[in-house]
Image (cartoon, helix red, strand yellow):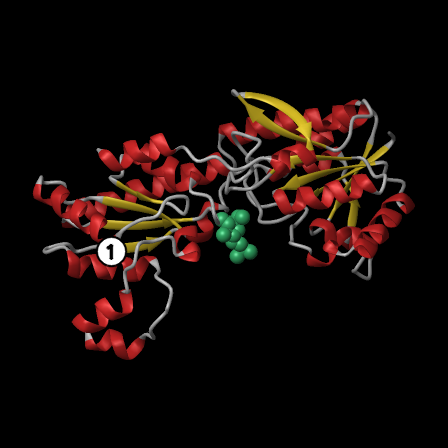
Amino acid sequence: MHRIGVLTSGGDAPGMNAAVVSVARFAALYDMELVGIKRGYNGLLRKRKHIEDDMEILALDTVLDIADQPGTYLRTARCIEFLNPDVREFAVRNLREMEIEGLIVIGGDGSFNGAMALCNLGMPCIGIPGTIDNDLAYTERSLGYDTAVNVCVNSVRMIRATSRSHDRVAVVEVMGRNCGDIALRTAMCTGSEILIVPEQTFNMYQIANRIESLMRDGDTRATVIVAEGVFQNQNMEPFDAYEYLSARDPEWGKKHSPNQPLDSHTLAKALRYMVPGCEARSTVLGYIQRGSAPYAEDAAFAFESGALAVKLLKDGIQEQVIGVRNGKVFFMPIREALGLKPKFDKNLYDLINAL
Ligand code: F6P
């Protein structure tokens, strides 16, 4: 191959830039020209007036500047139109017109589905997992996950310093979509006492009882780590927060409506009533989890995965995704990888909640 492309797609993840840099360095090593496609699959659809806004030759000099930067220099987006087969054929025509012979896609499962579709149309693709959520079953780690966890760990430590000073319980919500991995690892690394994840149902009364017993034993800074997906799944045993809170706070009933899904702030407020003396406060960490420069684990994986992706294309191997298994970087067919069922570490979950 003489010319290959690279794009970042889905939510941005720390390490995406570092992976692009690695791709650029190894492409240069094999005398391949590298084209950066902007805004995920959108760039392949040539939506913008000037081609430089959709595609850009990535000179080594340009990319070396971005290696340590958070975010993604190539920009990213989710491209719903790409589900349409005609649109995908149009994308392949554009790639051919640009003389791009292979494509490296850095993103999550939606992005990999797009890559598989392009392979079926004869465009060789390789996927590098890039999502803070770590929700790809085939790999132990995706780019951005370790950095997001480090951000969460640092944040929880800071929150707990103030919680401890005030003898307060902290409820901290972290990202992860339907996956509880960020929450689990954050809870483990911070010694948090209660973990709530979408993979396991939870019971508000049990949580309240546990906080009560922790507080009785002198643990007045008990920390609840909750994954955002819990509130989307509503994976909880019956607890009508509206009814419970309206019965205790008439103002609540006026400001909120029944059937409003539970959120972290409501959860903390309910705990304040359920546990005598519990001054629970909530924090939603939000986008800071995606906005850090990559920590070492992600930077190292970016280096290795970028190198392997270019080598696979060079060797004529396609339709593969790169991942980590038993701590080692490996690759496997995209279709098989996407067919695997997510696994959740129930043992660790039980350990965290038992201590
Ligand atoms: O997939 C990464 C992620 O940050 C999820 O953890 C989160 O649910 C989602 O993206 C948020 O997406 P957006 O930035 O489009 O609101």
Q: Position of residue 137 (x, y in %)?
A: 55, 35
Q: Is residue 206 visible?
A: yes
Q: What residue sits 9% from the left and 39% below the top?
A: 217
**Above or below: residue 256 compared with residue 1:** below
Please tell me which residue lies in front, 324 or 207.
207
Q: Position of residue 166 (x, y in %)?
A: 15, 50
Q: Quadrant of residue 344?
A: top left
- CB at disc 1 and ligand 1 closer than 8 Å: no
Q: In the visual, does 35 lie left or right of 155?
A: right
Q: What residue sits 52% from the left and 29% below the top?
A: 140
Residue kind at label 1, given as amino acid type = Arg
Q: In the visual, does 234 lie left or right of 353?
A: right
Please tell me which residue lies in front, 138 or 287.
138
Q: Position of residue 67 (x, y in %)?
A: 61, 35
Quadrant occupied by the C terminus: top left
Q: What residue sits 26% from the left and 37% below the top?
A: 353
Q: Quadrant of residue 125?
A: top right
**Above or below: residue 338 compared with residue 77:** above
The residue at the far front in this view is 238
The residue at the far bottom in this view is 254
Please tell me which residue lies in front, 309 or 288.
309
Please tell me which residue lies in front, 68 or 96.
96
Q: In the visual, does 211 lie left or right of 123?
A: left
Q: Is residue 64 visible?
A: no
Mark 1 element type: strand
Q: Which residue is mark 1?
A: 281
Q: What residue sits 27% from the left and 79% below the top?
A: 254
Q: Position of residue 187 (x, y in %)?
A: 32, 38
Crowd class of label 1 (few under 14; some 14 to 19; many from 20; radius 10 Å): many
